[in-house]
Every structure is written in C-alpha cells, then in structure tokens.
Image: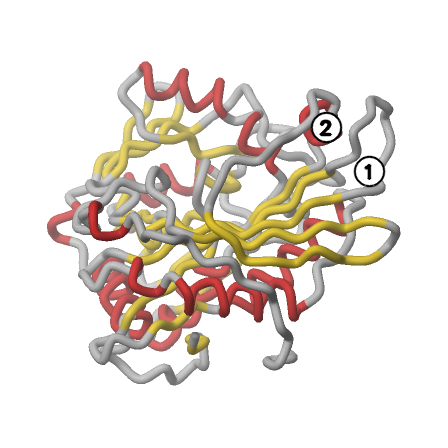
Amino acid sequence: MVEAYSIPVTKIEHSRLPGITLENIPFGRTFTDHMLEADYENGEWKNVEIKPYQPLEISPSLAALHYGQAIFEGIKAYKNEAGEAYIFRPYDNYKRFNLSAARMEMPEVPEDIFIEGMRQLIALDKNWIPAKENHSLYIRPFMFSSDEMIGVRASEKYKFMIILSPTGPYYSAPMRIYVEEKYTRAAPGGVGYAKAAGNYGAAMYVTAQAKKQGYDQVLWTDVYEHKYVQEIGTMNVFFVIGDTAVTPDLSAGTILAGVTRDSVMTILEEMGLHVEERPVSVDSLIDAYKAGQLREVFGTGTAATVSLIRELKYKDFVMTFDTDKWTVTPEIKSRLDAIREGRDADKFGWMFKV
C-alpha cells in the first residue's frame, strides 16, 4: 500500500451527523457525508476523488443497467474503547473483489485506490462509526460498467465507488430458514463464487416466496439433486454436529468464500472444535437431528455477522432448535466481537487501523 497516495478531497459544508441518532440504526438506509469515486477509461484509473455523498447522473444506455456487469463487497469498521477506528480484514475483501472483477471481465482496482481510498474516506467520516455494541460502519465498495451504449460486450469504461453506512444488527432475532429444492442460486462454472450483483437479484423472487410462508431466508441446495446445502441468501452456513463444526466446501465454485466464514473457522478451532469443509447433504442433517447430534445451526456474513438459526424446513420435515441453550454460537460471536471492538487482543492480525 502506498500511504502517501494523495486523493483530492472536497468536504461537505455542513455534516448531517448532528441530526442523526446512530443507536439502533437500521441496516443500509443511512449514509455518511462523503463517498469515494473513480473512473476507468482508456485502460487506466483516473478522476479518483472523495467528495460529498450525492446522486449519480447516468445515461439510460448505461451498460450496467442492461447487461449486469456489477460487483460489490461488504466490509465493516469499528471503534475500540479508545475511540480509534479499525477495519476488519479489508485485504481479504480486496482480493475477493478483484477475483469477482476477473470473473465478470472487469478491470482490477489498484490497492492504493481500494485500501488507501477506503482508509482516507473512513478517516474523514469516522465520527459516523457508532460506539455501541453490535453496531458498526458498513463499507460498500462497488464497481459497474459505465459505457453509454447498447451492445453485448464487456464495457470499456467502469466506475468504482465506496460508500459508508452506520448500522446496527442485521438480523435481530434467531432465524427461520426454508431449504430450497426447486430454484438454484449457482452452478459449477457459473458466478456463484463471485460477489456479482446479479446473484442477489436472481434470489429475490425465491426469498419472497419463502417469506410468504413465514421464513426469513432460503438455504440453497445443489443444482443437480437439490440434496446438498450450499449457502443462505446473505450468509454462509455452519452446522455443529457433536463436537464437529461442518460447513459446505468451496471446491465447486458455487459458494462465496466469506471472510466472516474464514474467521469463524479459525475461532472454532481455537475453541477446540474440529472443523470440516465438505459436502453436506440435507439427509445427513436430518439423521443427525433425529439422533440428537445436530446441536446448533448458524449463518455467517459481513452484514449478518453470526446469526442463530432456530428452524430449518426441508419438504415436510421441520427441525427446530432451542437457541437459548446454545453455547458454541454465542461464544463465537462473543470472541469475534471482542476482537473487532478492541476488547481482546488481535492475535490473528485481522484489524486494519484507519
């Protein structure tokens, strides 16, 4: 990283922060005073700047609107007890962002724009980070094709941006999950491993159908047999079976390699649990449940962090869990929060100081 990288800054005249209460703030609805914007043209990045948060002026022929060349990331920043701002594992998201860019035939974003730009933006708006338990500053880097023409080909121009949003808990209560057995999120050879915008757009109809039945999200299954679980709509998934934590493996390229997922696996091993990444069939979960061995089920993600799952429904079979008696999932969340909020030593080197 080139810390001396100079980004022009235009500051807002009057901050909106004094009129906003950051406590219990809903996810993704309030944004900070400033944003970062950069353009890719003629094979190079230019016009990098930090400026007041504002609408974009776009052409109706904007390529991203027609052909879906758009990717994003989700990252979080926290304040420790001394009021210092830290970002959680931004380099891992940076690597995944450019992996997504390669799959979508988009240009790589340089480190000095992504990481140093993010650092400077948060330094400017760090007063927006809620100093409250289970609260954070959500960071949304994203890129989209910006050619102003209709034609099925990779764009020649792109826009990269970072916006910031203070937030409270994403899921405030244990979740009910519907195991999907008709529709598919991703297939081998597709873009399931990329954080492409279209992955989420295609999931909305299915999620809406599940919500009509009283469920919060869907747990996707494999494209061939609909027997092996993959990921939940906004999260990776874990199952505690006996003294082993099991999560679907990433080898097929259909599951997002979550940064929180990786962090949780590290913490699970530190807690003394055996961790397995392997194919997980729904039938094996039902067998473990009937045998009293399926102890806990939880999801992990940047927005959701660690979310308890109190019910899984597959066909006509419903698995319910008494989350009040759980020990593993609350301990994971407690340890992760302590590191991110500066109450425990950052022994894994996850926190990046702003």
Which quadrant: the C terminus?
bottom left
Residue type highlighted by circle 1? Ser
**Pointer 1 local density, CA inside 10 Å: few below 14, some 14–19, many at least 20:** many
In which quadrant of the rendered view does residue 92 lie? Answer: bottom right
Measured in 3D between alpha carbons, the distance from the residue under mark 1 to the one under mark 2, in whole angstroms, is: 10 Å
In depth, the one of 252 and 236 nearer the eye is 236
Q: Residue type at mark 2?
A: Leu
Kindly state the secondary structure of the residue where label 2 is placed.
loop
Quadrant location of the N terminus?
bottom right
Q: Is residue 299 above or below residue 118?
A: above
Q: Residue at x 43, y 45 (%)?
A: 235
Counting other residues with Cα less than 10 Å from the Cα at mark 2, is it few (<14), some (14-19), or many (20 or more)? Answer: some
In the visual, does 87 lie left or right of 20? right
Residue situated in front as seen by the camera: 202 or 161: 161
List x then y, in percent, for residue 272.
33, 75
Residue drawn at (37%, 71%), measured in percent from left and top?
267
Residue 294 visible somewhere in the drawing: no
On the image, the x and y values in percent for residue 190 come to 72, 37
Point out residue 205 in the picture as x, y percentages from the top left corner. Answer: 49, 18
Q: Quadrant of residue 195?
A: top right
Kindly identify which residue carries mark 1: 155
Closer to viewer: mark 1 or mark 2: 2
Asked whether residue 10 is in view, the answer is yes
Residue at the spot 60% in from the left edge and 58% down from the top edge: 49
Residue 62: which numbered mark, if any?
A: 2
